[in-house]
Image: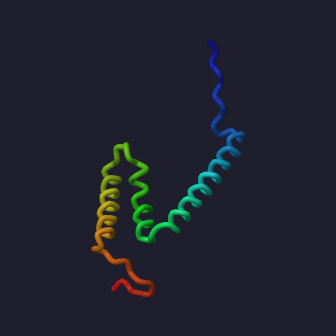
Amino acid sequence: MSLQSQPDKKSPLHWPTAIGLGLVGTTVYQAFFIYGINRTLAGNASLMLATAPIITTLGEVPTPLQAVGAGGVIAGSLLVRAGKIEPRKPGESGR
C-alpha cells in the first residue's frame, strides 16, 4: 500500500479554483439576494439578514459571548417583528 502525497494547500495551482469559487459564490448569493429583496418587504429582508449568522451556526456549541450576541439578535428581531420598535422615517432624527 503506497501513500499518495497530499498537494500543498498553498500551491499556486489552487488559486484559480479559489478565485472561481469566490466569484461564483458571491454572484449566486447576490443574484438570489436581489431576487428575494424584490419579492418581500424591506423589514422582512432585514430580519432575515440579521438572523443569518445564527442560522449558519446551528448545530455548533456557541461560546458564552456568541450566545449573548445571538440572544441580542433574536430579542431585537422579535421586538421589531412585534411592532414594539418602529423604524425611523427618512429625515427623522433619533431624538
| Nearer to me, 59 or 69 | 59
Q: Quadrant of residue 41?
A: bottom left
Look at the image and name its color scheme: rainbow
Residue 69 located left or right of residue 31: left
Furthest-top residue in this view: 1
Q: Quadrant of residue 69?
A: bottom left
Residue 12 located left or right of residue 32: right
Residue 1 located left or right of residue 78: right
Tell me the residue at 35%/53% (across/down). Answer: 66
Residue 25 located left or right of residue 48: right
| Nearer to me, 91 or 62 | 91
Tell me the residue at 42%/55% (across/down). Answer: 53
Locate the N terminus and report the quarter of the image it occupies. Answer: top right
| Nearer to me, 7 or 55 | 55
Position of residue 84 measured from the top left corner of the image (x, y, whole percent): 27, 74
- Number of numbered discs overlaid on the protein picture: 0
Is residue 93 depicted above or below 44 in this figure? below
Position of residue 42 measured from the top left corner of the image (x, y, whole percent): 45, 71
Tell me the residue at 33%/86% (across/down). Answer: 95
Position of residue 43 measured from the top left corner of the image (x, y, whole percent): 41, 70
Position of residue 61 measured from the top left corner of the image (x, y, whole percent): 34, 44
Is residue 29 depicted above or below 77 in this figure? above
